[in-house]
Image (spheres, rainbow, N blue to C red):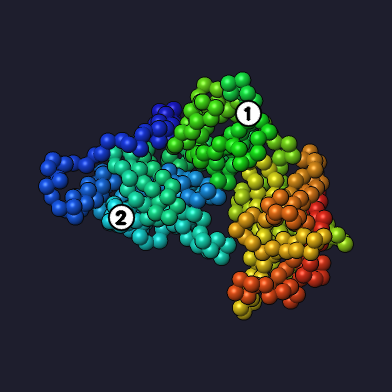
Amino acid sequence: MMKTRKSLILLAAAVLLSPLASSCLKDQADIFEKPSSTRMQEFLENVRTVLKEADKGWMLSYYPGSTSPTCYIGVEFTDQEVVAYSQGAPEEGVKSTYVLSTNDGAVLSFDTYNTAIHYYATPDASHYQARGGDFDFDIMNVGEDRIVLRGKRSRNYCYLDRLKVSATEFLEEINEAQNDFDIVSFRGEITGGLVEGFLDGVSNTLSIGRKGAETAEMTTARYMIVPGGIHINEPFTFQGVEFQDFTYDKEAGTFTGSGLTFQKVVPEGFVPYRDYLGDWTFNYDGGSFPVEIVAFEEGSSFKIKGLSEYFEPVIGYNAARGYLTWLVQAIGSAGAIDIMLCAWDSTAGYLTWNTEDPVGLDGFVEDNTVENLKVNWEYNGVWGSYSNDSWLIWGLSGGSSAGAYSDWSFATGNYQLPGPLSMVKIAE
């Protein structure tokens, strides 16, 4: 087992290889005497050969859009087919096809639907623009042990690394590492200054900055969880120190990178995702009613049942700091009317249905040590000079206001949910 684990760790660390690894294309002598179309076809056939020659397949380090987690996908190639293994089902290979073609360069496309590969790139009722993923990739560089890809839509770099163990074995080891990885923030010193960092487990983004810095002032990087810590494919520099790999000692509570040791910190008021699940009393200006918070996307969002009989709004979860986010959102349609949950400044009398800027409320727990948690909903400061303290159900027609949509109501009995707003959890 130790030998296998060592192989896995070495494989996970293979991403340390430079994206500029030497090409493994064969028989390159005098290729520039051939037409460009011939050279490209030879290049693609060599790529196919390299893909097939990996007897245990490849591990795709996959970087979808910034709001989705990074992940690993195991892939095994034949002449025209690929078998893919996801972290969610590491023992279940899903077969589909792939093509190598030209589209402003060499492209690897997973051209038929594969649940393991297409999950982040496929729209659904809750993600009409999908989750920022790709299934068409520009081939940026080819080496015997690493192929560098870039998503056609996301423009994110992804990496194929040759496996030394089976995809199932590798993914099971990674899943074990993820289950054991429970650090969300850290604190320490760099060149004499106090710094703090956060690990967002939803988007797998590390943020680091001086202590007390605003979010916008922090340096960020996407990471992959590996046995014993995290790896960042594209290293970043902060206060003159280059970081790429961090190790986490769970027992000691230390997080170490580039020879510097930071201490694990539990953020003030931090509440784990699963502690929000359950029954609550929802309070508004005028009364209260029962609601239930249920899981929507595990680890990243919830839905509130009971707020209305007509819809269940999606509530986000900030995995790095353990609080809730509630934003303006579409909640349904009726004929030509789009129905929105709109931010409302009940004092100034203004509302907004703008979903491009994240207008809404943040939900902070007063005391995370008690069984009856209390969440206070606070305006997130995004809406200029106005303050979102309440919600309205509003209709849009062709993107313009169609007025209050009074056919739908909150549990208040009408289309208004006036603040201040809060929730208290009902102890089991």
Within 10 Å of disc 2 (Cα), the crowding (few <14, some 14-19, many 20+) is few
SS type, badge 2: loop
> Residue 287's quadrant in the figure?
bottom right
Question: Residue 417, position in %: x, y?
Answer: 79, 63
**Residue marked by disc 1:** 195
**Residue marked by disc 2:** 104
Q: Residue at x 58, y 46 (%)?
A: 202
Give the side of residue 263 with respect to residue 388, left or right: left
**Nearest to the observer: residue 32 or residue 253:** 32
Q: Residue at x 67, y 72 (%)?
A: 401
SS type, badge 1: strand
Question: Residue 391, position in %: x, y?
Answer: 75, 62
Give the side of residue 132 with respect to residue 263, left or right: left
In the image, farthest residue toward the bottom: 335
Question: Residue 10, position in %: x, y?
Answer: 40, 31
Give the side of residue 193 with respect to residue 88, left or right: right
> Residue 345's quadrant in the figure?
bottom right
Q: Is residue 8 above or below residue 281?
A: above
In the image, farthest residue toward the front: 385
Asked whether the viewer can see residue 92, the reply is: no
Give the side of residue 208 with respect to residue 345, left or right: left
Q: Please report whichever mark, 1 or 2, sits nearer to the chain's N-terminal start.
A: 2
Q: Is residue 270 above or below residue 380?
A: above
Asked whether disc 1 touches disc 2, contact meaning CB atoms under 8 Å apart, the reply is no
In the image, farthest residue toward the right: 286
Q: Looking at the rendering, in which quadrant would you find the N terminus?
A: top left
Identity, as a three-letter code, of the amino acid under mark 2: Asp
Identity, as a three-letter code, of the amino acid under mark 1: Val
**Nearest to the observer: residue 372 or residue 94:** 372
Q: Residue at x 86, y 59 (%)?
A: 285
